Image (cartoon, helix red, strand yellow):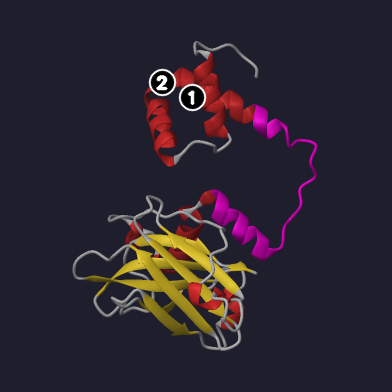
Amino acid sequence: MTGQLPYDEGDYVLVGEYALGLLSPVAAAAFEARLVSEPDLRALYATWADDLVGLTDDIAPVVPPAKVQRRIEAELFGLATIRRAFAGWRGMGWLVGGAVAAAFTLLLVMDAELLAPDGPRAPAYTAEIMAEDGSMLILASYDAADGALLVRRERGTPPPGRVLELWLIAGDAAPVSLGVLPQTNDVRFDIVEGLRPQLDGGILAISDEPLGGSTTGAPTGAVLATGAITSL
């Protein structure tokens, strides 16, 4: 590292862990709170960031396929990718207020029914749709043979007088509603043929909507959880 700043070794390590994205959400939030009031700490972080960026100077840029880029952005930037996808169709106003927090994950999660020893086949795509604080977890697996998206709600409920609605985001297309989650934990959504190709590399999102679901054809409530669709 370059430069000398009035911080001990522990702070140097902490700044490095933050710059590399290694801190937990709680630790990162505490560090960011310090950044607001400690200009020397901000300077130390800037030094770390400049040094890390310099490591890539000799690497030739490569443009990944669109599907791969969406997955990379989902894993790295979390809700920002979802916000861009939705904002292009309704603006940012609907994102304000409520529990607007989500994180992407690329963990492969199989539906128990499809993975049972006597199950007929494995799913073609899976997704883990989870809120950043872990308060909501919804597992999804897609059976390409009959176009069925099997959704299992492990935890999480809508606010009183509201429902959870499932959306598919594919590239720059408008979010498409796949339906409202019922009170039961398990539900099957039959995906129309025109949407099936869009599952590959897409994103699933859960929004908070009025009873009966969105009446506009677009999300109107807060994003509660999101998950990248992963092919097997």
Q: Residues within 10 Å of mark 2 (few under 14, many from 20)?
A: few
Q: Find out whether residue 64 is within the magenta segment.
A: yes
Q: Do tag 2 and tag 1 residues touch (Cβ < 8 Å)?
A: yes
Secondary structure category for the residue under label 1: helix
**Residue drawn 52% across and 56% down?**
105
Please tell me which residue lies in front, 77 or 229.
229
Can you say which quadrant of the picture contains the N terminus?
top right
Q: What is the three-letter code of the residue carrying label 1?
A: Arg
Q: Position of residue 79 (x, y in %)?
A: 46, 54
Can you say which quadrant of the picture contains the C terminus?
bottom right
Secondary structure category for the residue under label 2: loop
Q: Which residue is mark 1?
A: 42
User: Bounds of the magenta span?
Assistant: 51-76
Going by the image, does 197 lie left or right of 213? right
Whether residue 85 appears in this view of the structure is yes
Q: Which residue is mark 2?
A: 38
